[in-house]
Amino acid sequence: MTLLTEFDWSSLVYVGIFLGVLMTFEGLRQIASRSESRSEARNRRMRMIAAGASTEELLRLLKPGRDGWQLDGVPFLGTLPADLRKAGLLIRPGLFMMLAAGGTAVLALAASTVVPALLAGAIAVLACLVVPVIWVQMLRNRRMAALVAQLPDALELMARGLTVGHPLNATIASVATDMKDPVATEFGIMVDQISYGDDIVGSVMDLADRTGLEDVRYLAVAIAIQHGTGGNLARVLETLSKVIRERMAMRRRIKAISAEGRLTSIFLSCLPLIILGATSITAPGYYVDVSGDPLFKPFAIIVSVLIVANFLVMRRLVNFRF
């Protein structure tokens, strides 16, 4: 009894919190990670076919659902289902939010033992919600950029197939089998839709809706017009491929020309924060000594609003639509 009385039971609480955070992190890592890298297989569709998945299972897993999203319209989280699809992640948005909420609660509880509760909550939300969503958006942007870069080659492959007499669905299948991710996976979904009974025009329109890319929308419109009125689709695809390449070159040229302005906006936006951090380190009492003044909080709020407004205005000035 004496040993039990003297034992510090609070240490068990810390151990439990540590294990909870560790298990949450490991669960997120396993869900977000892939069993195979992109270099080990051409696309997810081919891996699923090799595993014996049926066409219905392929469509159910790869074709985006039409269910409503409860957080639709909420800033930063309203586009989460579309972002996950464009990033190539199969995790459900509800499960993603549940894991993020669980990780936030566990981390907030652990951090509250060493820092104030409000600060602990802010740190937990930043680490378990904001950072994962930003990571998903980065994966989305990277995958969509790769898709646009591969699209001209895919259109040229389709045009060559049409020139030698192959049907359109066969040329789409050749893109799915002969090219790499992400264009192979997206075209593979179209092949599965066509095999399951969807028409070609509807499948390409679904691709445009799924990716949200303007260049893919041009492809969908071209195929829809050719399907309805006829014409030389191979020549149209070759022309579209050339246009997309020129648009990509124009985007890179604009990005190079605006690099100085974008770097200046980043520097001017970060400068107040750098000054604040440097001042707090070199003179810790510079702000603390006047924090009790009645005018400190109003002026701090005004300065914060101006910093945010400066960031938004500068970003608007240099964020060209490519």
Image (tube, rainbow, N blue to C red):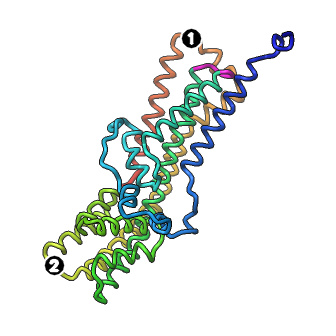
Question: For residue 186, which quarter of the picture?
Answer: bottom left
Give me the residue at 60% from left, 37% from top: 24
Predominant secondary structure in magenta? Answer: loop
- Determine whether the residue tagged by mark 1 lies in a helix, strand or loop: loop
The residue sitting at the bottom extreme is 164
Give me the residue at 25% from left, 65% from top: 198
Disc on res. 121: none
Q: Earlier in the sequence, mark 2 or mark 1?
A: 2
Q: Quadrant of the N terminus?
A: top right
- Determine whether the residue tagged by mark 2 lies in a helix, strand or loop: loop
Mark 1: few, some, or many residues within 10 Å (few <14, many ≥20)?
A: few
Mark 2: few, some, or many residues within 10 Å (few <14, many ≥20)?
A: few
Q: Amino acid at mark 1?
A: Asp
Circle 2 residue: 230
Disc on res. 293: 1
Tell me where the magenta segment starts and ends, as one range: 113-117
Question: For residue 216, which quarter of the picture?
Answer: bottom left
Q: Is residue 32 left or right of residue 56?
A: right
Along the line of sight, the residue nearer the viewer: 244 or 63? 63
Q: Nearer the viewer, mark 2 or mark 1?
A: 2
The residue sitting at the left extreme is 229
Q: Are marks 2 and 1 in contact (CB under 8 Å)?
A: no
